[in-house]
Image (spheres, rainbow, N blue to C red):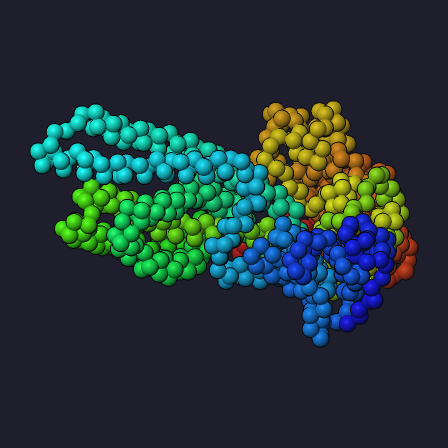
Amino acid sequence: MQHHDPVGTPGGESGSAPAAQEARLPASENVLATLAVDLDEQLRFADGELVLTDRRLHATAASGLPQEWMLTSSGLSLHLADHAGVGTLDLHGPEGRLARWRYTLAGQAAALRLVKLFDQQRAGTAPAAAEGDADEGAGTEAQAPPSTWVLLRLGRFARPYRAQLIAGFVLTLLSTAATLVPPYLTIPLMDDILIPFQNGKAIDPMLVVMYLGGLLGAALLGWGLGWARTYLLALVSERMGADLRTTTYEHLLTLPLDYFGGKRTGDLMARIGSETDRINVFLSLHALDFLTDVIMIVMTAVILVSINPLLAVVTLVPLPFIAWMIHVVRDRLRTGFEKIDRVWSEVTNVLADTIPGIRVVKAFAQEKREADRFREANKYNLQVNDRLNRTWSLFTPSVSLLTEIGLLVVWGFGIWQVARGRITVGVLTAFIAYIGRFYTRLDSMSRIVSVTQKAAAGAKRIFDILDHVSNVPEPANPVRVQRVEGRIEMRDVGFRYGSRAVIRDLDLVIRPGEMIGLVGHSGSGKSTLVNLICRFYDVTDGAILVDGTDIRRFAVADYRRHVGLVLQEPFLFFGTIAQNIAYGKPDASREEIVAAARAAHAHDFILRLPHGYDSLVGERGQGLSGGERQRISIARALLIDPRILILDEATSAVDTETEKEIQKALDNLVQGRTTIAIAHRLSTLRKADRLVVMDRGQVVEVGPHDELMARQGAYWRLYQAQARQVDEEETLRETAPTHAAHPAGDA
């Protein structure tokens, strides 16, 4: 392990601000994450900072000198834990713990991000390698049982509504207190009016009116306060649910491509849709009921003790048994509901697969097969629910039985107390009224165990998304992208899928405005290199520079605004032609949209559509041909006027005539831009300034077409192989009619 001696001034003077720390770091280092360490060893508030770069972990504390550890040191590992509102981050080496930092849980998200990026940098794990990890992660999610405490993490979404929640809590207290008044008034009604009347004493009408008025007033007050409480907290819970959905979706959009490669569409849709809806129902209904039940039980217990302590103790006899049952059942419900969520996501996955691919399903007459697949998923979902319902169906009646037994105990003990003259009939009547409410609330609380575990399972699946840190991190202090000239430089670039190296020691310089053609066998690394330039993934080794700046130092969205991408299979969103062209520039005028369509040779066919630019393209653009979709995607790229253009097999999926139209559009698109093109047909790259031949993740040849053909090297062999394939295809087409003309018998 390499440990660097502390440098600079003590952390109390200069280490508190991130800028001060980063000033000590070389300008060539990319800051990946920072964490404010705001507690010292004695858990007192203090200033400190951890900064993770692509080379080292740098730490300053309120006392002591700055320290740093190189990520290349052997045996380094970070361990994260939290307890009672305090997070702890330990750095371990081969000889044991090297350092410990503490922080309040406000920094938990930053700590999770720092640990994730630390592990990635230490392991040299490329983002795409996480495809395997994603599957493992999905398995880990499935195996880890959700804790009820995960619901406390929803507190971050409650923070903006503190005032409303406090008001709701006060209303809950008042409404609960109002509902406890009527049983108390039954004591004087029984002891001062009804029982004396049975003994021959006249009833005082004014006293009756006063007590009945008190009962009515308490009922009306309880109703009004209960309505205000329910309405206010329902509004808050709806907003919290909306914030949770929005935050989850926004975070999902920031995650890298490899995350989506390891997840099913139906599962992610279920998480953001049904899981957040379940949490919202829990917050708006069940959490409110639970709070009311707790307050009711506490207040009732206080009143019972104040009336008769001995009778109150007898009343609470069933409580330990009910608590034990809840504890036993809770763990089974917790894992059961989480499994139900996963099984249900399999049902939605079948729908998410089948509905978008309905054309293929029908083309291959696989309706019955897909129906059987859905039936099997639905059947398994039913079996899992049945197993859980067996546990739940036994639990609920058992709690009801215990409460009934508790009520009988109170009746028996109360009658014995009345017979001995220790309490009055009015006191016993009030006790029975209170105890009925007490056990009703207790039974209600036991039922909340089910919905709480469902909500906890849903919250865990939501936070599994929110806790996932992007493998393409935003820099802590990004370099602003002013104007991109388009010079791309790759220095010793390396990239690995897990342990398999896909790109190795690649050096290449692309001049501004130059068109480069990437060629090579399948699996040679062409698409991977393009993904690295787009920063869909980050390099494992080396660096990619644009205009002299490492692209990892740019904000991701800021950088990608200057990169245009035309794919082999263009994706169109449901909407109009104009909306799809203007997707990268939503505020574009109609004139700009039409100009981009003209340049993409799409204007003519658009005008032939029923509503022109306002025609709907259908789901994923299914209402258009492949060539039409491709020209709209070219218009979309033209509209944002990118300085760097990526063409990934843009003409390989269309016929020859359509290819000519698309090629004309591409000729307009590449004008004055740095262009990197991958093409299946080498003939389409003849206009490229240089061809870059790749083989097994390395550049083996670079030069113009004629020069490379003259060398008779790797490119020449590729070209000859493709020419022979074309000749064979033409020969087959020419001989096919001849064979077709002969009768079957002559053959």
Q: Is residue 2 left or right of residue 158?
A: right
> Along the line of sight, which residue is nearer the eye, 609 or 4?
4
Tell me the residue at 32%/45% (across/down): 303
Numbered circles on residues, count: 0
700 and 261: which is toward the camera: 261
Q: Kindly tell me whether residue 2 is visible in this rendering.
A: yes
Q: Who is closer to the viewer here, 290 or 606?
A: 290
In the image, residue 41 above or below residue 345: below
Q: Quadrant of the C terminus?
A: bottom right
Q: Nearer the viewer, residue 530 or 222?
A: 222
> Vertical placement of 364 versus 483: above or below?
below
The residue most toward the bottom is: 95
Q: Quadrant of residue 218?
A: top left
Q: Percent position (x, y) of residue 442?
A: 33, 49
Question: For the view shown, which residue lies furthest in the left direction?
Answer: 200
How far across and how far down the image is residue 193, in percent? 17, 33
**Residue at (87%, 61%) from the top-left corner?**
712
**Which residue shows up at 82% across the image and 41% down it?**
481
**Rendered location of residue 378, percent (x, y):** 40, 52
The answer to whether residue 377 is seen in the rendering is no
The quarter of the image holding the N terminus is bottom right
Q: Position of residue 716 (x, y in %)?
A: 84, 59
Give the residue displayed 56% in from the left and 57% down from the top. 84
